[in-house]
Image (tube, grey):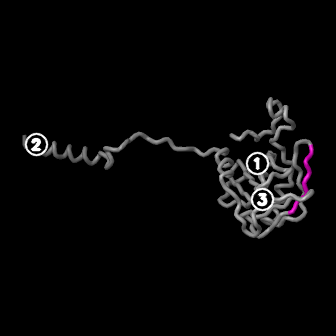
């Protein structure tokens, strides 16, 4: 009997040490949320530009208002980088939204994004209030042709010319249906990347 009492005490201590401090709380594991590329794109629409150097333009529709995509055929970044250059021209899906004076750009491969203000005057597009180059205004000429937005740089020093290199590299394909019938029936050739879940 003398041997049993120390054994019971030892067993009790071991069992109490193995229990968690919150033994009365819910021990059901909570599923972790995995961020998808679409989440980053959608989150960007919850933000608005900051008037760094120029007042925000009026929230009025422009002729360029739409979502555009391009798939850059270059190979993805050959090595991982902790601080990639802003607007680096890399391969993969890029999205650009122009909506009522706010531009948003998103690179789905690594989640890089930016937003700022824009205005349109004639055939000129002006980009400003971009947090990556808040003191600079980019000036471009634009053309809409065959469902694509084609930009040409006039002057844009942002990110040592990387923003311009990226924006003018290839045409941006519009995610807007070409006509009312296509919009209603959804029978049109959507560019890859136009699905909001991509």
Residue 167, horizontal then vertical, whole percent: 83, 55
Placement of the N terminus among the 4 image quadrants: top left
Q: Are marks 2 and 1 in contact (CB under 8 Å)?
A: no
Q: Which mark is residue 125?
A: none
Determine whether 12 is above or below 57 in the image.
above
Q: Residues within 10 Å of mark 3 (few under 14, many from 20)?
A: few
Determine whether 133 is above or below 31 in the image.
below
Q: CA distance from mark 3 to mark 2?
A: 86 Å
Left or right of residue 182: residue 23: left
* 2 vs 164, nearest the viewer: 164
Please give the name of the residue rendered at 25% of the width and 44% of the height, measured from the top-left corner: 15
Query: Which label sits in the foreground, 2 or 1?
Result: 1
Residue designated by label 3: 58
Which stretch did the figure color magenta? 139-145
- The stretch drawn in magenta includes residue 142: yes
Placement of the C terminus among the 4 image quadrants: top right
Please give the name of the residue rendered at 20% of the width and 44% of the height, measured from the top-left corner: 12
Residue designated by label 2: 3
Q: CA distance from mark 3 to mark 1?
A: 23 Å
Determine whether 145 is above or below 51 in the image.
above
Going from N to C along the chain, the mark reached first, 3 or 1, is 3
Q: Which mark is residue 95?
A: 1
Please give the name of the residue rendered at 77% of the width and 68% of the height, measured from the top-left corner: 54
Q: CA distance from mark 2 to mark 1?
A: 75 Å
Please give the name of the residue rendered at 16% of the width and 46% of the height, measured from the top-left corner: 9
* 85 vs 48, nearest the viewer: 48
Main SS, magenta residues: strand
Going from N to C along the chain, the mark reached first, 3 or 2, is 2
Residue extending farthest left: 1
Numbered disc 2: secondary structure? loop
Q: Give the quadrant of residue 174.
A: top right
């Amino acid at each position: 009997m003398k041997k049993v009492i120390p054994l019971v005490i030892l067993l009790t201590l071991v069992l109490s040490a193995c229990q968690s401090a919150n033994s009365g709380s819910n021990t059901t594991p909570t599923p972790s949320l995995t961020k998808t590329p679409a989440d980053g794109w959608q989150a960007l629409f919850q933000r608005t530009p900051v008037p760094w150097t120029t007042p925000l333009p009026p929230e009025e529709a422009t002729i360029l208002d739409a979502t555009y995509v391009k798939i850059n055929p270059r190979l993805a970044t050959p090595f991982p980088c902790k601080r990639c250059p802003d607007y680096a021209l890399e391969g993969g899906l890029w999205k650009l939204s122009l909506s009522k004076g706010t531009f948003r750009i998103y690179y789905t491969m690594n989640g890089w994004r930016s937003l700022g203000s824009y205005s349109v005057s004639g055939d000129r597009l002006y980009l400003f209030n971009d947090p990556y180059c808040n003191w600079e205004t980019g000036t471009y000429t634009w053309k809409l042709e065959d469902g694509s937005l084609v930009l040409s740089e006039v002057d844009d020093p942002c990110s040592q010319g990387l923003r311009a290199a990226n924006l003018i590299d290839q045409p941006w394909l519009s995610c807007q249906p070409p006509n009312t019938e296509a919009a209603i029936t959804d029978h049109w050739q959507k560019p890859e990347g136009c699905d909001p879940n991509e």
